[in-house]
Amino acid sequence: AQRLNLFETLAAPAGDPMLDLQPALRTSRVLAAHGVATGRGVRVAVVDSGIDSAHTELAGAVAATRNLVGGVDEVGAVVPERHGTAMAGVIAARRGNARGIVGVAPDAAILGLRACAQPAGAPRGRCTSFTVARALNAAFALDADIVNLSFAGPYDPTLARFIDAAEAEGRVLVAARADDDTAAFPAAAPTVLAVERARADAPDPSAALPAPGDDVVSTTPGDGYGVFGGASLAAAHVSGLAALVLQAAPALDPVDVRAVLTRAVRRGPGDAAVVDACRALAAAVDEAGATVPTICATS
């Protein structure tokens, strides 16, 4: 006879098994910043194609959805589409769910505002002045703190009025800009935070905020994942950073948020500029007169 000993299997579920496919979260110190802020309490409107709110990575992340295009499915829900689902994943994929990836602001609340239609298999969604205006109006009604606009087109006077109203109401607008396309709208609007994909050959990183936009892994409809590239992903990354900043210093206005994110730009691996999340949080709380988070000051 002997005492029973306890043995354990040596494989345990990984916290987020695809995290190694997201090196930008480490080089920009987003993971370190999560010790200070995760976007909790911040509402991010994603004006885009339809978001798959049933995706496991987005469970509990999507606080509201609106279909401003028409074309709902048979049960009346927003049609899940590839581009909008990817943007939501970059911003707010839930951390520690043993599923896959991590969002920049994994506790932020997503407002999925479908203003763009993206047929199955189409590489891009298409929006109109009218559908985007309806989506911006919905963002105001739903009290969005941040509005992500991962699309571009010509100057639009109607949308310019909505953008001015957003600034007046204290909402942060983030928009994608293709490489050095200074005329792209809405990124060209002076009150919008313009974002380009980070690259070593950027002539002036201060002209548009640089963020990861190459080989980005994110969510796709039907509980899937895909690899994406382009300024759309970079804009979503910055919307997530803005959510971290607003959680840490909620009194900041859009001008302050743009300033602290711009001050946080540094050169990263390969000489590409990157927004350092820890620097952004330190600048945010300094701007608000609070104590600098030590986890970011020493990371």
Image: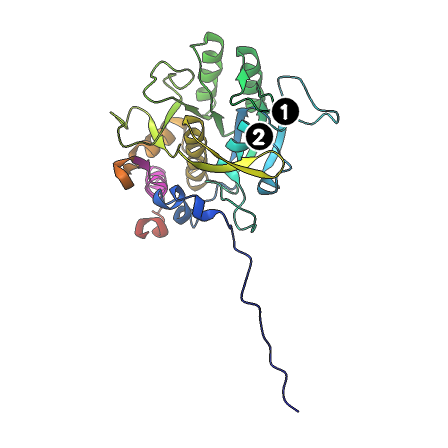
Residue 174 vs 17, above or below: the answer is above
**Where residue 131 sits: x, y (%)?**
57, 15
The mark nearer the N terminus, 2 or 1, is 1
Residue pictured at 63% horizontal, 87% vertical: 3
Disc 1 crowd, CA 10 A, few/some/many (<14, 14-19, 20+):
many
Residue 41 visible in this rendered orientation of the protein = no
Q: Which residue is mark 2?
A: 111
Q: Main secondary structure of the magenta part?
A: helix
Kindly identify the amino acid type of the residue bearing the numbered disc 1: Arg
Badges 2 and 1: C-beta atoms under 8 Å apart? yes
Secondary structure type for disc 2 = strand
The relative height of residue 16 versus residue 153 in the rendered view (above or below) is: below
Choose between 254 and 106: the one closer to the eye. 106
Residue numbers of the magenta segment:
273-290
Give me the residue at 36% from left, 52% from top. 295
Which disc, if any, is residue 66? Answer: 1
- Considering every residue shown, the one lying at the far front of the view is 121
The mark total stands at: 2
Q: Is residue 298 magenta?
A: no
Picture coordinates of residue 45 (x, y %)? Answer: 53, 28
Taking the spot 47% from the left edge, 24% from the top edge, the residue there is 150
